[in-house]
Image: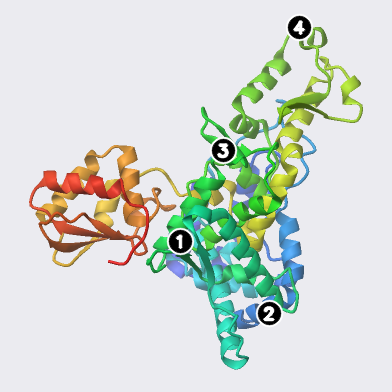
Amino acid sequence: LIGRIQQYITVRWYTGRQVDDLRYGTMVLGILYRANEPWRNHRPQVYLSNDEKGRGTLRTFFSRRNQDLKARSRSSNEDVKAKPLTRIITSNKGERHVPLVKATLFNNDAVNAELSLKADYRRWIENAGLSFCKFNWILDASSKRNILNIDARYQMSEHFREAMLARIYSGNIASSPYLVLRVRRNNLIRDATIQLQNARLENMTEDGGDDENNMYFKKPLKIKFEGEEGVDEGGVQKEFFQLVVAQLFDPLYGMFTYNENTRICWFNHKSISTDEEYELIGIILGLAIYNGVILDLRFPMFVYKKLLGYDATMEDMKEVDPELAKGFQKLMTFPGDVESTFCRTFTVSYQAFGATHTVELKEGGAKIPLTNDNREEYVDLYSKWYLQGSISKQFEAFRKGFMKVCGGPALRLFRPEELHLMICGTEDLDFEALEKKTQYDGGYNKDSPVIKNLWKILKRFNLEQKKKFLMFCTGSDRAPINGLGDLSFTISKNGTDTDRLPTSHTCFNHLLLPQYESEDTLEKNLLIAVQNCKGFGLL
């Protein structure tokens, strides 16, 4: 049935190319999409709220944005705020925990390939006719990312224009058209936190004390490492993001725990880190999205579900802490007497800083024994505490930082797995697809001997070496949403056979490759280069 409806939409699209003709087919597909959603995981259809309708032109929309941003920001944040976990899904009484078919089956390839996303975005914002942004199941992750980028460009260009006008007409030299962070490598977190706070205070001064206006995050981001000559055209900020994430997620830093078996990071409920540090992580994620930077994060999918307001299931518990979830399953299916065997009450105990802390899962829980009759309630309350209550302070600060940058209607287009792909990219590294899309300059072409040798070497590389090569050339060891075939990559000639190592412009995904005479020399110098690629300087 889904296939037939998709055929109808595709034929109508190619024969008429009139968006309004597709309304009914799209709506019927939406009914199937919602029916396919897991129980308790359905989120409402994406429509603009009442205060987002009838705004007229985009210029009117963005000129009003500063005036009503406080109300819109509050509305947007509440819309995607995680709902209280009144119950974790643990039983098998008719609940369906996973979709029946993949959500990507509802994406229409013809629409995603041919649709003018700018025009669709205009119809959505101006509430002028049918927009596929209102029926987001039709759009794939790449199209949604592009719409978010369109929204970001409009917002950043509007704020850039306002900042430039302020400098010209009012002589306000403090108003910068960029969000500039000057940081030291040996004091990265503190410098970033202080300067983001200063940017907030500067913005409040410009906007008459309005602390709800976070438009300064929409400015183009520029990073300056103190003592280094690199000019940030994109590559410097990529390394900045990588270094900040590596430090904040280091288990020794104490903000997150790391499960060696699942390679998953989770919020440390025993952390003494400040709210500002967790807020910084949220801001970093948002800035990475708006500036098109892929991050190597090890969050479970449940983090993205919480950001978008989805409920929790036992599948989420299994991903966050498989051993604890396994214990819950054993408890739920235990055939004997639970009370005499487990000897537990409705409490949770944990060690922190040399002391034992006990939390009651409900009022008077220390006096309520765990029994066969109340074990499901025990699992629900324990899971609720583990996934929400124990980390509420940390996650709320993280969510607050993320929503400062990304809060708004465009975020509601995404499913959790799409948000994850946009932030983290994919680890599926198809170098054959990259080879097909690569462009050559400076005298090289796909048949040049050194180019043929390069691709032979790259295809021999193991996964870790391929990641290092991508990091060296692009500033990220992951592929975009649609894979390496979606990456703009250029290889240029950089002199004749010499002892010079390959270099790169990570800002432009550009490899500068000397014309080595032998394959062995190329492989040797390439390995040296990719394994020692930190820092920026002017060539």
Secondary structure state at the residue bearing disc 1: helix
Real-space CA distance between mark 1 and mark 4, rounded to the nearest whole angstrom: 58 Å
Q: Are marks 2 and 3 in contact (CB under 8 Å)?
A: no
Is residue 100 at all visible to an observer of this figure?
no
**Which of disc 4 and disc 1 is earlier in sequence?**
1
Residue underneath mark 3: 252
Instruction: In the rendered view, tell whether residue 269 sits above or below residue 123.
Output: above
Distance from Cα at disc 4 to Cα at disc 2? 68 Å
Report the amino acid beneath label 1.
Gln
Residue at point 56%, 37% (across, down): 251
C-alpha span from label 4 to label 3: 42 Å
Q: Quadrant of residue 237?
A: bottom left
Residue name at image x 33 percent, y 50 percent = 470
Report which residue position mark 4 lands on.
Answer: 336
Which of marks 3 and 2 precedes in the sequence?
2
Q: Which residue is under mark 1?
A: 237
Examine the rendered structure and indicate whether residue 502 appears above or below residue 169. Answer: above
Q: Residue furthest left?
A: 517
Q: In front here: 411 or 173?
A: 173
Left or right: residue 421 compared with residue 26: left
Where residue 174 appears, x then y in whole percent? 60, 80
Q: Nearer the viewer, residue 404 or 420?
A: 404
